[in-house]
Image (cartoon, rainbow, N blue to C red):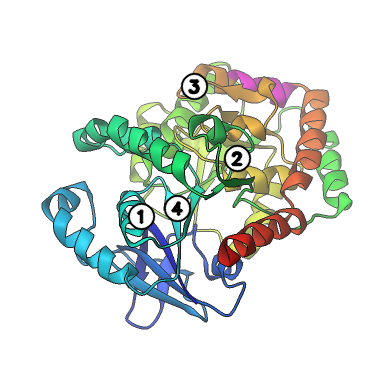
Amino acid sequence: MNVAWIHDHQFFTDGLNYYSRGSMPSSVWERYLLEDCNLYVFGRKLQEKSNILSSYSGVQFVLSNYYSNFTSFIKNYFKIVKELDRFLSDKDKVIIRLPSVLGLLACNIVKKRKIPYMLEVVGCAYDSFNSYGNIVGKILANPYDFIMKKRVQEASHVLYVTQEYLQALYPNNKGITVACTNAMVSPVEESVLQTRIERIKSRKAGDPFVIGQIGNLSVSYKGYSVAIEALAHLKKQNIKVEFRVGGNGSPDAILKQAKQLNVEDCIKILGPIPHEEIHLFYDAIDCYIHPSLLEGLPRVCVEAISRGCPCATSKAGGTPELINKLHLHNIGDSLKLAEDIRLLSSNRKMLTDAAVENFQKAKLYYSTITSTKRKDFIENFYKS
């Protein structure tokens, strides 16, 4: 059986292997290779090199020759439709991840060709297009959101990565649906929580409160500007904070704003963190912050809470499903983020309560639970 997976995700190739910016490592393809099938991935080309291997046995990659950004999409629309149609011509099943431009085009093609398909709903189309960064994205936000609502509504199989948020935005009342996050983590020993509590107990007056964030440093919607503004608010109150930032991309914009707000001495840019070392990052900070402007369900927050790490986050996407409302701020609200950090840094009981609550919440996202649920759903789709 030939199965296609389609999304706007960008992959870099050195001519031998394919690489992802981070969200599509090789291990992710295991979930789709459940039967005697071949998986064909259709996405976009990434020009700058990435070090996250995505190549996997049984998976072949096909990258669009014509679609790299909105400008090329408009210019080469008919060419993109033709290459996608050719790609899908011999596929038996299709998995489409939304929101994505290629995904919505694929919906039209599979309907015409009568190829069985399922949707993975991982975010809000309006937010994705509106935050793209140019006028074209803002113009397309509403129509693409409307089209995505229709496509989800009429699909026979829909997988949502949230428990409620995306289901409310994109309801499906006639097909088979499942709530199953992509942000799963391996089960964690209870001793990790005890170590966290000991860390909280051992904090001394005058120690800097260490906060951290992981994400692509070049992506503005991760909310680094909000975090830096919050640092400036805290510095004015003489609250010592150290902000550790990990991830790919250029830190230039972050450092420029930090210098303007006189908080560059509070920031440590760590660069890319190997996946096998990410847990060490969370264990070495007092609070994980995630002031993102755009989200589905943030994997990094699931990873953070699995380590019993207290969090202060925005209300973007499905994030409120993970974090206590006491520690949430409205998107872009640096004053509330600063206040949340201040309260956590000064209240040992609040910090401990957040650690315990987060650790328990993370158990809902253990791979032992989510993997079985996803496998059953995809098997049902393959057999339909």
Q: Earlier in the sequence, mark 2 or mark 1?
A: 1
Residue at the disc numbered 3: 334
Question: In the displayed structure, would residue 300 be above or below residue 238?
Answer: below
Q: Earlier in the sequence, mark 4 or mark 3?
A: 4
In percent of width and height, residue 54 lies at 47, 70
- Give the SS element for disc 2: loop
Q: Residues within 10 Å of mark 2 (few under 14, many from 20)?
A: many
Residue at the disc numbered 2: 162
The label shown at residue 111 is 1
Q: Residues within 10 Å of mark 3 (few under 14, many from 20)?
A: many
Q: Residues within 10 Å of mark 1 (few under 14, many from 20)?
A: few
Residue type of the residue flagged with mark 4 = Arg
Residue at the disc numbered 4: 97
- Give the SS element for disc 1: helix
Q: Earlier in the sequence, mark 2 or mark 4?
A: 4
User: Which marked residue is nearer to the observer: mark 1 or mark 3?
Assistant: 1
Residue type of the residue flagged with mark 2 = Thr
Query: What residue do we see at 77% from left, 58% from top?
Result: 368
Q: Earlier in the sequence, mark 4 or mark 1?
A: 4
User: Which marked residue is nearer to the observer: mark 4 or mark 3?
Assistant: 4
Dominant secondary structure, magenta: helix
Residue type of the residue flagged with mark 1 = Lys
